[in-house]
Image: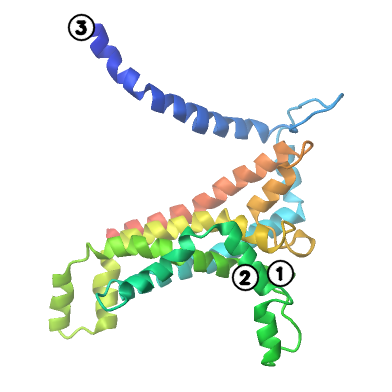
């Protein structure tokens, strides 16, 4: 191999990955930033010109009540999902890692919602939570409530219903990650703590939690990101309308609503996507700093 071939070989090997990165990551990101400062639409008619509007989209967003409602809904969504999807999968993983009879059945049962289609699961939940669905029928028959609960038409009940669906569907996925992490926690530490008289709760806080702290932080970050970007659950449960007057919409739903159609406002929608990007950075930075202090 001559010197020229040897010099070009590394560049040729990384070229496919570099081209892929530029086409599908870098260019879309740069184009998103460009669109946020324009009034571009998917289809422009005669007289419609793409103009540079400066920060006008950001200024309009500040007075858009739907945007603030969507941000509040997404943050509430994240605050509900974060503790439940970080702690519950760990407790379930501790239960199903034990070698007892029929444990394979329970592992499969917990993981099955993960592989189920989000659309199909959402439609089943929508049928269950409808005014004439099985849950309201059961509650009224047992006289727990006098009137059907508006799970799909009340803003906050829509958010709670959607978070319940997200938590139910995500438990198995994060349980698998915790099972892998628990395999690295030393059994000797548990045995030593037990010999010193530590009970199950004490061993959980002093041995298990420190052993899976990094994984717990990773899962918390993943939950925050996916919760702030939630779309399918709320979209399906509300029939794409975002609840009463769109008050139950999330940020991603709002982006989709503004950008859809031939004359959708791409500039304004991409402005919202940039806001969402910076919003997802906040919990990531906070959780990373908490974890770094705990490991210090």
- In x, y percent, where is residue 3? 22, 7
Residue 118 vertical position relative to residue 47 in the rendered view, above or below = below
| Residues packed near mark 3 inside 10 Å, few (<14), some (14 to 19) or many (20 plus) | few
- In x, y percent, where is residue 181? 28, 61
Disc 2 from disc 1: Cα separation:
8 Å
Disc 3: which residue: 2
| Marked residue nearer the N-terminal end (3 or 2) | 3
Q: Residue at x 30, y 13 (%)?
A: 8
Residue 161 vertical position relative to residue 60 in the rendered view, above or below = below
Disc 1: which residue: 152
Assign the C terminus to one quadrant of the image: bottom left
- In x, y percent, where is residue 274? 60, 42
| Marked residue nearer the N-terminal end (2 or 1) | 1
Along the horizontal axis of the image, is 168 left or right of 59?
left
Q: Which element type, helix, strand or loop, lies under badge 3?
A: loop
| Residues packed near mark 2 inside 10 Å, few (<14), some (14 to 19) or many (20 plus) | some
Q: Are marks 2 and 1 in contact (CB under 8 Å)?
A: yes
Residue 16 vertical position relative to residue 101 in the rendered view, above or below = above
């Amino acid at each position: 191999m001559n010197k020229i071939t040897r010099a070009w070989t590394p560049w040729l090997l990384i070229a496919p990955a570099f081209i892929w990165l530029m086409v599908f990551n870098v260019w879309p990101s740069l184009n998103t930033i460009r669109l946020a400062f324009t009034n571009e639409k998917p289809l422009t008619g005669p007289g419609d010109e793409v103009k540079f509007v400066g920060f006008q989209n950001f200024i309009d967003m500040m007075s858009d009540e739907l945007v603030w409602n969507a941000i509040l809904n997404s943050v509430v969504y994240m605050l509900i999902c974060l503790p439940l999807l970080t702690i519950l999968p760990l407790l379930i993983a501790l239960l199903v890692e034990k070698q007892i009879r029929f444990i394979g059945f329970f592992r499969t049962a917990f993981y099955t919602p993960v592989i189920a289609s989000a659309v199909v699961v959402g439609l089943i939940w929508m049928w269950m939570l409808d005014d004439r669905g099985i849950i309201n029928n059961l509650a009224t028959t047992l006289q727990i409530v006098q009137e059907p609960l508006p799970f799909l038409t009340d803003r906050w009940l829509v958010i709670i219903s959607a978070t319940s669906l997200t938590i139910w569907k995500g438990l198995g996925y994060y349980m698998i990650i915790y099972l892998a992490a628990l395999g690295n926690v030393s059994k000797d530490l548990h045995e030593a703590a037990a010999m010193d008289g530590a009970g199950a709760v004490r061993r959980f806080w002093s041995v298990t939690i420190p052993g899976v702290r990094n994984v717990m932080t990773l899962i918390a970050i993943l939950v925050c990101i996916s919760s702030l970007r939630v779309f399918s659950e709320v979209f399906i449960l509300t029939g794409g309308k975002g609840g009463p007057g769109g008050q139950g919409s999330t940020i991603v739903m709002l982006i989709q609503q503004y950008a859809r159609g031939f004359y959708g406002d791409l500039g304004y929608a991409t402005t919202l996507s940039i806001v969402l990007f910076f919003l997802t950075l906040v919990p990531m930075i906070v959780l990373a700093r908490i974890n770094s202090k705990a490991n210090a």
